[in-house]
Image: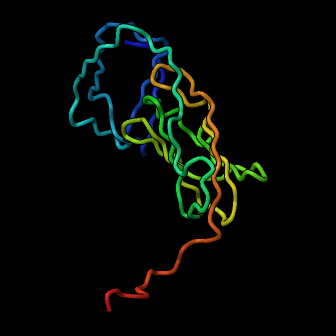
Amino acid sequence: YRQGSYALSDGNRRVTFTSATALATNTDHTVTVSTEVTDLVGFPVDNPGSATFRTGTAGDVTRPTVTAVDPANNATGVGTDASVQISFSEPVSSVTVTPSGFRVLHEATGQLLEGTVAVAADFRSATFRPAGGFDPSTRYQVQANSEITDLAGQTLSFFVASFTTAAGTDSERPSVVAVSPD
């Protein structure tokens, strides 16, 4: 048995275990899910079992970084219905990617936007979707901070980028205006 904490995510369908201490290097570790795991009604898990993995030969001492952001830094004309995605240099702990660690602010006022944050299945990117969209013709700042950690607990190097939204949403359907040759 290993001391640590558990966190539920993805509608209580995913459990993330964070060890209280670093796992020993170059060692086999076994994760077991027993029938003691139940749903909210009390039904046990259908497929109890175990899985084994081996840790690497050296501990992780490299901090994760943001390697890409979409919309790109200083982008203009961004749609008011866009979302913001950041990519990481290595997998991150999904439970540490929260709206306070990955956030978008109205640059002129510093006001935080409300929205949802989702981490990709490979833990290498996260997407922020603003509640109600972005305001038109507005500059926003994207921040990712040290609340986000990699799987070894190394904190993210601070990241900041900005973008400006378009004057409004494009609500007109395209139409054919000319055909060539006649």
Quarter location, residue 31:
top left
- For this orientation, the residue located farthest to the front is 181
Residue depicted at 69% across the width and 49% down the height: 105
Colour style of the rendered protein structure: rainbow
Quarter location, residue 36:
top left
Q: In x, y percent, where is residue 26? A: 32, 7
In the image, residue 180 above or below residue 44? below
- For this orientation, the residue located farthest to the bottom is 182
| Front residue of this view, candidates 38 and 77 | 77
Q: Could you tell whether 15 is left or right of 82 in the image? A: left
Numbered disc total: 0
Quarter location, residue 76:
bottom right
Q: In x, y percent, where is residue 43? A: 29, 39
Q: Could you tell whether 38 is left or right of 153 in the image? A: left
Q: In x, y percent, where is residue 107? A: 73, 51
Residue depicted at 38% across the width and 37% down the height: 14
Q: Could you tell whether 143 is left or right of 66 in the image? A: right
Residue depicted at 40% across the width and 8% down the height: 58
Residue depicted at 43% across the width and 36% down the height: 124
Is the C terminus in the top left, top right, bottom left or bottom right quadrant? bottom left
Q: In x, y percent, where is residue 57? A: 35, 8
Is the N terminus in the top left, top right, bottom left or bottom right quadrant? top left
| Front residue of this view, candidates 116 and 15 | 116
